[in-house]
Amino acid sequence: MYKGFVLSESLKNPLILNDFEKIYVKVESHPEAKLKIWHDFKLKIEDNNIDNAVKVFAEQIRNTWYVHFWNDNIVYIILSNKIFKIPKEPKQWQSKEYQELKEYAVSHGVEERYLDFWIED
């Protein structure tokens, strides 16, 4: 099973979130950001549905945002029309795959400070 975080504000059509199982929804205040209030959906996706889910989010994610899903070994990072599959690292992101993702994301407008992916079990 995969878990992941999606901000409804990051989606072209946030109604697609109705098609996914929610673990919880949290409303967050981010006074430093352009959008001050974020609606953070923690989702659960079965292994056999992950490929379809990441494709849906790759089509729906807005530029400069991302969605991420993880299991015990893998993290999917989904940007607009781009999907990265990187190893889940225990303490700090250092893999070659992470470095490629980071370079791509920053060059496409994602702020580097947001690239320390929050993973909770």
Image (cartoon, grey):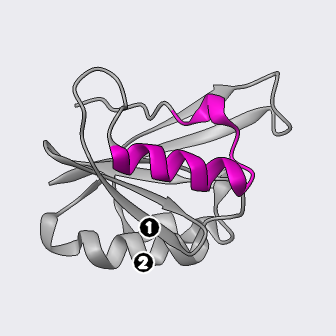
Q: Residue at x 75, y 51 (%)?
A: 109
**Residue at 68% across / 47% down in the picture?**
110
Residue under pointer 2: 55
Q: At label 2, which amino acid type do we have?
A: Lys
Question: How far across and down, in percent of the image, does residue 33 sit?
Answer: 81, 31
**Quick check: 59 left or right of 42?**
right
Which is more toward the observer, 50 or 74? 74
Marks 2/1: CA distance? 8 Å
**Residue 21 found in image quarter:** bottom left
Q: Is residue 112 left or right of residue 90?
A: right
Range shown magenta? 96-115
The reply to whether the magenta stretch includes residue 104 is: yes
Q: Which residue is mark 1?
A: 83
Which corner quadrant of the image does residue 89 belong to?
top left
* Residue 53 picture location, percent across and down: 36, 72
Which amino acid type is marked by label 1? Ile
- Determine whether the residue tagged by mark 1 lies in a helix, strand or loop: strand
Residue 112 lies in the magenta stretch: yes
Placement of the C terminus among the 4 image quadrants: top left
Q: Are marks 2 and 1 in contact (CB under 8 Å)?
A: yes
